[in-house]
Image (spheres, rainbow, N blue to C red):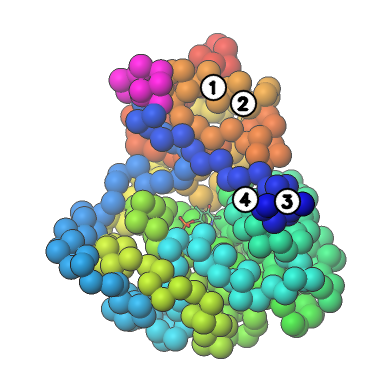
Amino acid sequence: MSLVRKHLLKINPYEAGCPIEEIKRKLGLKEVIKIASNENPLGPSPKAIEAVRKSLSSVNRYPDSNGFYLKKKLAKFFNLKPLNIALGNGSDELIEIIIKAFVEDDEHVITADSTFLEYKIISSVKNRAVVTVPLRYFKYDLGAIKGKINERTKLVFIANPNNPTGTYVTKYEMEEFFKGLPEGFLVVLDEAYDAFVDVDDFPNSLSYIKRRNVLVLKTFSKAYGLAGLRIGYALGNPELISYLERARQPFNVNSLAQAAAAAALDDKKFFNKTRRLILDGKKYLYESLGQLGIAYIPSVANFILIDVNRDCVSVFKEMLNDGVIVRDMRQYGLKNFIRVTIGTKKENERFIKVLRKVLGVRS
Ligand SMILES: *Cc1c(COP(=O)(O)O)cnc(C)c1O
């Protein structure tokens, strides 16, 4: 007999990017850069920092369980109602709440094979079956996903843009997917990186929430620079949102996170500066990788998937020894790839220098 529930023994826990301080200590390095977890290299918005400072003296109180003020702001921002919004302790928590709220024991979840790991990990922890569909040319293959949908399907997770590939589902592809799609299950469009998208044919996910069983997930962790505070949200029709509200814990989003998010949403200057930095950095990285003859997948997000053409774990380790933390893609099933977050100009230059050394590229 097993003490722990048996399905838990089969799960590989999420391996997060290495913390900077730990690497400095372990390797005795002074200057370490972390470009591994798609965080904002500019830090949090100054307005968010100020809002947190102001809120600190009230942390003796429980947070606002309904996130009244933030929901109101978000509703205005998206031209929706507060009843269209559920808040989560990061969108990670919303993924968990969604699975908890909707998927019965004998139902399954469908997603891509190389995508955000949490869909699979959280489903597995909750002992729900996951059907994974291979990417096609590094993109979500919605046609193949549609082909896997049956009466056991309760949830489909689509990361758009996809992490870790940086590719996206186009508006046309999304329309085709929804055309003639059976009812009775939920589609989750996870748009953690939508702030960085710079193409014209990206779908307007909000147009689906009125028509279909669709939930859209967004987060303050990436473009808004608040990953450490843990806050994300789901947008959907009031009925779907009300189920998330039932399934969540009453104080799931702390007061500092709520205050910071509301302030960050208002800080358009910081948001635009972030976006500019990422788009400029992407251009630089494309050019540099091109010159070095290193292959990469074009990205609409704030990271780039790079083909290092050898075992990615050894590349990761060698770069780490030079104080550059990237993400090796072994856990994602992409054994010859690393994922690099677009950083500041200085970080991008250092990354190229170290990558070039590690891969032994002359030019
Ligand atoms: C980073 C990321 C998230 C965000 O997670 P939080 O829990 O909000 O920090 C969600 N989905 C994808 C695809 C991501 O890459």
Label 2 environment density (alpha carbons within 10 Å; few <14, some 14–19, many ≥20)? some
Label 3 vs label 2, nearer the camera: 3
Considering only order in the chain, which callout, 1 or 4, is on the residue closer to the N terminus?
4
Label 4 vs label 3, nearer the camera: 3
* Element class at badge 2: helix
**Seen in the image, is 294 located left or right of residue 89?**
right
Residue under circle 1?
317
Report the residue at 16% width, 58% height from top.
Answer: 53
**Seen in the image, is 114 located left or right of residue 51?**
right
**Seen in the image, is 316 located left or right of residue 255?**
right
| 74 falls in the magenta region | no
* Element class at badge 4: helix
Considering only order in the chain, which callout, 3 or 4, is on the residue closer to the N terminus?
3
Cβ–Cβ under 8 Å for marks 1 and 2? yes
Range shown magenta: 23-31
Residue under circle 2?
313
Q: Nearer the viewer, residue 131 or 105?
A: 105
Q: Is residue 220 above or below residue 311?
A: below
